[in-house]
Amino acid sequence: MNGTCNARCFYCPTAQDDPGQPMTNTIVFDHPDNYADYVSRYHIKGVGFSGGEPLLTFDRLLAYLKALKKRVDHPVYTWLYTNGILVNREKLAALCDGGLDEIRFDLSANGYRLETLEQALHVIPRVTVEIPAIPEDISTVKQLMIDLERLGVNHLNLHQIRCTPHNVNHLIDRGYTFVRGPGVTVLESELTALALIQYALERDISLPINYCSFAFRHQFQGMGARKRCAKEIRAGHEDITPTGYIRRLTVIGAENHIADVCKTLADRGVDASLYSISAKKDAISFSAELWHLIDFSKVRLKVGYSQAVLREGVSYRHPFKKVALDRGKSLVIEKQMVHSTDWLDSEAVQGFGSLLDIRGKLQTDSTQDPRLRGPCKNILPFETITPGLARYY
């Protein structure tokens, strides 16, 4: 909703000093109806209003909430992030009337005060506390969990503190240990979250608790954004992996060998949209569902991955497709190449093929799988969600 905040938390990853316009994934939506049309166009089922502090621009927040509920035909679950400082009964009533489904309080930004949260419990259908797992506050949060259970709060979300150029000095001053992965995170924050969950289990605290590690959140949020647009820009001979990447399988060989592959596909009555022959007729790209029809004995295989990225304008660096929304606003989907293997030898081809199920999905989530050898060893993040917590280096 905005880029400003009325709290000054040491862990905040951004400066929070830019009022800005409402945006999602770097795309600005300066009119509520434009955003509602975007949600409708991509059948988005959940929308969270964040900031900054969304309540600093309360009229704007209400306008976007009401536009969603009015213009989108399918059900959309809505929630609001707030530090609670500006919450009052009048605002809560207006949000309820506007159709807000859930409110999430970052109590750590307001001294873990419960007054405004208690007001929300009688108005908003679902009330959640979402806080960073702060090592120095572990004793406070242990008591907080007991209080939240007593009050009937629906959920407690704990998330991991991450390091950015804005907060790095604050985190260094506290002596935290940094873990490097898809982002730089704080080890002690994760250990605190796990200790709090263990405490709740040992004391039979019935409050539902979720830990959102950065490694897991990064994978799931990225997957959702990629899947949203991938089906609009992928070719028929390409596949969308479970993690939302667009996979292209290509074999190359002598023209007569490629011709033999094409003849096999034609003789089997395969839909021509599931494969594509190169202009030189020395390569063919094909959907994974045709794997069992390809004779790999005289050709070489390459596996490539692209991601669909939604942008406000064309960069002219990647293949793209324009998408028109209502009210004259348009967006662009670009297909950006992110990874390509070397040409696979027969052993690597056999290993990769043995991992594909009948739907063309990889049947492993282990980086130690012996079939992921040679050039295939780095493909796992493009094929499947990596389970578990981040590895500590």
Image (cartoon, rainbow, N blue to C red):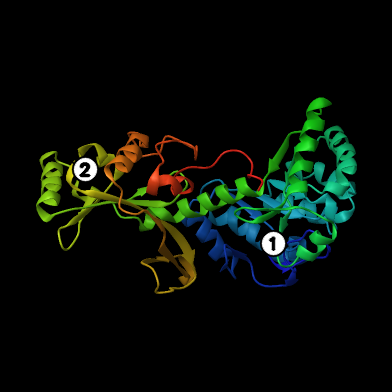
Q: Is residue 41 above or below residue 22?
A: above
Please count the marks in the image: 2
Q: Label 1: which residue?
A: 61
* Local crowd size for mark 1, using a 10 Å CA cut-off: few (<14), some (14–19), many (≥20): many
Residue 148 vs 162, above or below: the answer is above
Task: Answer yes or no: is residue 68 visible.
Answer: yes
Instruction: Name the residue at 19% across, 59% down.
Output: 278
Between 323 and 177, the residue placed more toward the observer is 177
In the rendered image, which quarter is residue 279 located in? bottom left
The answer to whether any part of residue 204 appears in the image is no
Residue 168 spot, x, y in % from top left: 76, 63
Element under disc 2: helix
Note whether 234 is above or below 353 in the view shown: below
Kind of residue at badge 1: Leu
Q: Residues within 10 Å of mark 2 (few under 14, many from 20)?
A: some
Task: Judge left or right: residue 274 versus residue 35.
Answer: left
The Cα atoms of the two marked residues, 2 and 1, are separated by 57 Å
Classify residue 347 by image quadrant: top left
Which of these two is toward me, 319 or 294?
A: 294
The residue that mark 2 highlights is: 296
Kind of residue indicated by mark 2: Phe
Give the left or right position of residue 330, taking residue 294 as reference.
Answer: right
* Rendering coords of residue 298 (x, y %): 17, 46
Q: Residue at x 90, y 37 (%)?
A: 143
Q: Earlier in the sequence, mark 2 or mark 1?
A: 1
- Identify the secondary structure beneath mark 1: helix
Asked whether 212 or 179 is in front, the reply is 179
The dot on residue 309 is none
- Apparent side of residue 65 relative to residue 108 in the rendered image (left or right): left
Q: Quadrant of the N terminus?
A: bottom right
Looking at the rendered image, the disc whose residue lies closer to the viewer, 2 or 1, is 2
Q: Is residue 73 left or right of residue 113?
A: left
